[in-house]
Amino acid sequence: MSGSEKHRDLRFVVIGAGMAGILSGIKLQEAGHRNVTIYEKADRIGGTWRENTYPGLTCDVPSHSYTYSFEPNPDWSRYLPPGAEIQDYFERTTRKYGVDKLIRFNEEIVSCEYRHGRWHIETRNGTRDEADVVIAATGVLHVPRYPDIDGIDDFEGAIFHTSRWDHSVPLDDRRIGVIGTGSTGVQIVSALSTRVKKLVHFQRTPQWIMPVENPEFTEEQKEAFRNDPELLKYMQNEPQYLANVERFTNAIVEPDSPAMEEIETIVRDYLENSVRDPELREKLRPSYRAACKRLIFSPDFYEAVQRPAVEVELGGIDRIEAKGVRMKDGTLHELDVIALATGFKADQFMRPMNVVGRHGVELNEVWGDTPRAYLSISIPDFPNLFMLNGPNGPVGNFSLIDIAEHQWHYVSQLIARLERGECAEICATHEALEQFDRDRIAAAKKTIFGSGCQSWYLDARGVPATWPWTQERFYQAMAEPDYTAYELVTRPGSSVESPRQEEVL
Ligand code: NA7
C-alpha cells in the first residue's frame, strides 16, 4: 500500500487455532498486519485434528492435497494421512510461520459484541479485548452429539464420545461396542477389528462404502518429493484426483448424471463383491442413494466386519444398562467399552459463544437452528466479522483447506477496503443474503444430499445446508466480492464515532 493512501492500522482477533485460524494468522502476517491475536479455547492448536484421536483416524482426502497450497509436505507416510500426522503438520507449520506467537491458549471467547464500531471480546477467564475485524475460524464439527439413549449413565464400563477418546482405557482383547456408522465409526471398526475379543457395530443406518487404496509412500518416493519441488507441487495438484473431485462435486449437483450413476455402480459392486455372506451383505446394504450421506472412503471396512470377532447389529437399541447395550428384541450385548461415534451438532459454528451485532442483534436469535451466511462468509448486521468454513459453504469429500484458502482470498479483499479507509464497516445486506438463500435452497433440494436420507448435511428443516452448486461456481464466487451485495458504511474522520453518524454508501 502506498504511503499516500489512507491506511488504518486494523486490529484483528481470530477465533480458533485450527486449520482455518492458522491460515488466517499466516495470511494476515503475510499482508503486513502486526496487530493480530488468535484465541484458542484449548491448550494446543489443531481443531478437529487435536480433538479427534480415535484409533484408525484418517483423513479421506489424499495427503498431498490436504495441505496448505503454499506449504507442501514431502513426508506424508501414506496416500491418506493419519490424523496424528496432520496434527504434526499443523503444529510444524504454525511454528514455521511464527503463528504460535499470536495465539493465546486456554482462552475460550464467550462473548463477542459489536459496539461503537468495534468488536468487544470477552473470554471465559474474563480477559477482555477489542478488535476492528473478527475472523471466525471456529470449525464446523466441534460440538459432540450424544445419542438420546436411555440408561447411558448406568453403564459400568467405559463410555465416551469418539472425539473425547479416553486413551487410558485398554482395548486389546476386550468387548467393544461402536455406535454409529459415519466415517468415524467405520474407521474405528476397521482399526479395532483385529485387536478385540468382540466388537459389536451398532448400525442404525448402513452406509455406502467407496473403496480406496491407502498405500504407504516408500522412502524413495519421499526422498524424491523432498528433492523435487515441482514433483511435490504436482502431487498437491494431482490431475487425476482433481478431476475426480470435479466429477464428484458435479455429480452431487446432478444426481441423475452419468457421473453419479458411476459412483452408484462402484459402491454397489464393491458391496456385492466384497461381502461373502448374503445375510451380512443385506445388513450392510443402504436403502438410500450413494453419496446422499457423506460418502465413506475405506480400504478395509468390509474386510473388518467379516472378521470373526465383529458383529453387525442392525436392530434398534432399547437402552444402555450396567453390563452393555440392550436391543429392542431383548438381546443384551455385554460390553467393556462403548464408543459413541454419533457425530456432531453441525449447526453450531461459533456458538455457544454469544455474538451480538449492530443494534444489539443476537446471532443466536438470527440463526436459531438454521444458520446461514451470505456466500458462507458474512452476516447482515454483523459487520467486519468474516467466517471461514461458515454455514452454507462447500463440504464433502474434498479438502476443506482448499475451501478455506479460497474464502480467505475473498475475505482479504473485504479487509483491504477497511484498511484503505474506504469504509469503516462492511457486511452483507439483508437483500443479498435473502436472495442467496432463496437460490441456495432451491438448488440444495435438487442435490443428491436432498435425495432422501438423514445426515449432518441437512438443516433442521431437512434441507441440505451445504453449498449446492459446482466447485467451479464456488471458485468463481470467491474470486472477487460483488460489492453491491454489501453494505459499506463510512464514518468520515473517525472509525469510532457513534453509529448515528453513519453514512451508508
Ligand atoms: P456422522 O457422519 O454424523 O455419523 C453419526 C452416526 O451415528 C450415524 O451412523 C448415525 O446414524 C449414528 N447415530 C446418531 N445418533 C444415534 C443414535 N441415537 N442411535 C444410533 N445411532 C446413532 O458422524 P461421524 O463422526 O462419523 O462423521 C462426521 C464427519 O466427520 C464426517 O462426515 C467427516 O466429515 C468427518 P444415522 O445415519 O443418523 O441413522
Image (cartoon, helix red, strand yellow):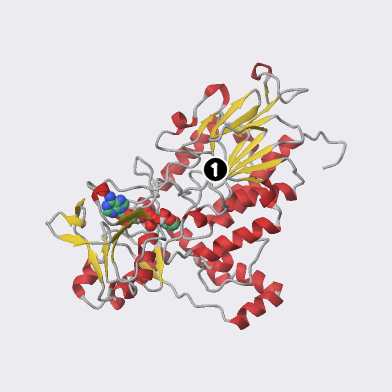
Residue drawn 12% across the image and 56% down it: 330
Side of 423 where 2 appears, left or right: right
Question: Is residue 254 at all visible to an observer of this figure?
Answer: no
Q: Residue furthest right?
A: 4
Spot occupied by residue 478 in the image (x, y as percentages of width and height)? 61, 48
**Front-lying residue, 450 or 47:** 47
Question: Is residue 135 at all visible to an observer of this figure?
Answer: yes
Depicted 412 relative to depicted 336: above or below? above
Depicted 237 relative to depicted 137: above or below? below
Residue drawn 42% across the image and 53% down it: 164
> Where does label 1 land, which residue?
375
- Location of the N terminus by quadrant is top right
- Location of the C terminus by quadrant is top right
Q: Quadrant of ligand 1?
A: bottom left
**Front-lying residue, 239 or 43:** 43
Side of 204 where 365 appears, left or right: right
Side of 177 where 140 appears, left or right: right
Spot occupied by residue 11 in the image (x, y as percentages of width and height)? 70, 36
Q: Residue furthest top?
A: 500
The mark tally for this picture is: 1
Q: Which kind of residue does numbered mark 1 sit on? A: Leu
Side of 375 where 231 appears, left or right: right
Spot occupied by residue 243 in the image (x, y as percentages of width and height)? 53, 67
Tell me the element at label 1.
loop
Depicted 149 relative to depicted 423: above or below? below
Label 1: few (<14), some (14–19) or many (≥20) C-alpha neighbours in 10 Å = many
* Occupied quadrant, residue 328: bottom left
**Front-lying residue, 57 or 449:** 57
Indicate yes or no: mark 1 CB to ligand 1 under 8 Å: no
Q: Residue furthest left?
A: 330
Spot occupied by residue 79 in the image (x, y as percentages of width and height)? 52, 73
